[in-house]
Amino acid sequence: MEVPTLVALAVDPVPWARAQMAFTLACHIILVPLGVSWTFLTLVANYRALRHDDPDALLLAQRWSKYMAVTFAVGAVTGTVLSFEFGLLWPRFMGRWGEAFGVPFAFEGIFFFTEAIFIAIYIFGWRRLRPWTHFWTGVPIVLAGLLGSVSVVAANAWMNAPSGFTLDAQGNVVEVDPVQVIFNDAMPLQAAHMVVAAYVVGGFLIASVYATGMLRGRRDRYHRLGFTIAFTVAAVMTPVQMGVGDALARWVYDEQPTKFAAIELVPKTSSAVPETLLGHLDSDGQVQGGLPIPGLASWLSDPSTGRSTVVQGLDAVPADTRPTTSQVNTVHLAWDVMVGLGTALFLLALWYAAGWAFRRRMPQGRTFLALAAAAGPLAVVTLEAGWIVTEVGRQPWIVYQRMRVEDAATTNSGVVITFIVVCLLYLLGAVALVLVLRAMSRRFRRGGGFTDDDAPYGPSAPAEQREEASVP
């Protein structure tokens, strides 16, 4: 009997490579805000516990440190997959630009291992270090998480503003300036935008858990404090993010006018360009639908010249050097989602601030708590939309005006299989993460406190006492 042979499907690997990279990045980016912000929130609770002898704050810090470790471990796995994908999915990109692009990742590796070491010290130090000594071991975690995120964003920013390299006659990199690679023109604003976003998203996401608990009747001081710490950080950072985002949009207007035209849905170069809410381009490149606000896009681009500001349209560059109509519509929709939800979160933060300003307490009504519970998932959607604007808006370039996406991708059609496998593995990982976190939450509630053999910051019981206590 003849064994049938498998014939490889003749598929274009480029869209599959893009889909796999987009999927894994979209999954990983959810964990990044938790990795950056949760340690800071834990230290805030820890500081309050030590400074004011607050048992509820101490309980929060202890539990948050456990959750933080779990999400860090999962984030390490998803981040490692992304690192391998650069070589597997984009071998020609790495072959040509790896010497420059890899520089920020070298530093990210240092910060990652530093963060991992001090997370272990912090968690195992609850019963082994003096209180303030233990608190200070958490500071390097915050700094390493911040600097690690900045390093990764620096690599992405370099793709938007490549610099710090010298090419030979064949276009190969022959010399690299690491400082210019890291501190490229796009890096300061992109890094600030991502770091602030991490505190906004992480704060709203964690606060949403406690808001849900309060809606279910858990209105004790522990839940109120958990909500207050997380939501306050998010509320403070939200207006900061709006300012940074505005500055970054102006940078895009100056340095990446084609991406800006996609964001604002501008088919033809003109002045007095309206800000079109929703809407889309049709197959003829004409704006259809939406709600235009006359002259606002020009005014926002450069308030000094107002409505007379000229905005470069998509027609200013050849069709093969700008996003497709479908990509333009995707970028514009993602921009509207990001700005719309960001504004809604800002208004929610104002409501929260007004409660403290006029009543000296957080809003207690179910409407506010329901919106706060929804703010976490909506903040994640806002973050995802922002990355869609950044990545899809740069098309067709993987390195802006230096290398196109199709020239960077793998030619191996087997990427279809890896895409399916990675999707299944990430799905299993997501389910496992949720189940573990929920199991930890139920165990903590049943235990009524942090029980890890002995009290935190308390003397450890002699070994013979622990053995006697374990005998039934």
Image (cartoon, rainbow, N blue to C red):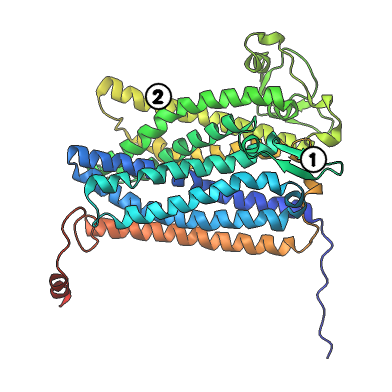
- Write down the quadrant of residue 333 in the picture: top right
Quadrant housing the N terminus: bottom right
N-term-proximal mark, 2 vs 1: 1
Q: Is residue 17 left or right of residue 225?
A: right
Looking at this view, is 300 or 160 the one in front? Answer: 160
Amino acid type at mark 1: Leu
Question: What residue is shown with label 2?
Answer: 350
Residue 167, label in figure:
1
Q: Residue at x 86, y 44 (%)?
A: 170
Q: Is residue 131 above or below residue 191?
A: below
Q: Residue at x 66, y 56 (%)?
A: 85
- Write down the quadrant of residue 462 in the picture: bottom left
Amino acid type at mark 2: Leu
Q: Is residue 220 left or right of residue 66?
A: left
Whole-percent x, y for residue 261 in the image: 73, 26
Q: Is residue 63 left or right of residue 92?
A: left
Looking at this view, is 87 or 111 the one in front? Answer: 111
Q: Residue at x 37, y 35 (%)?
A: 231
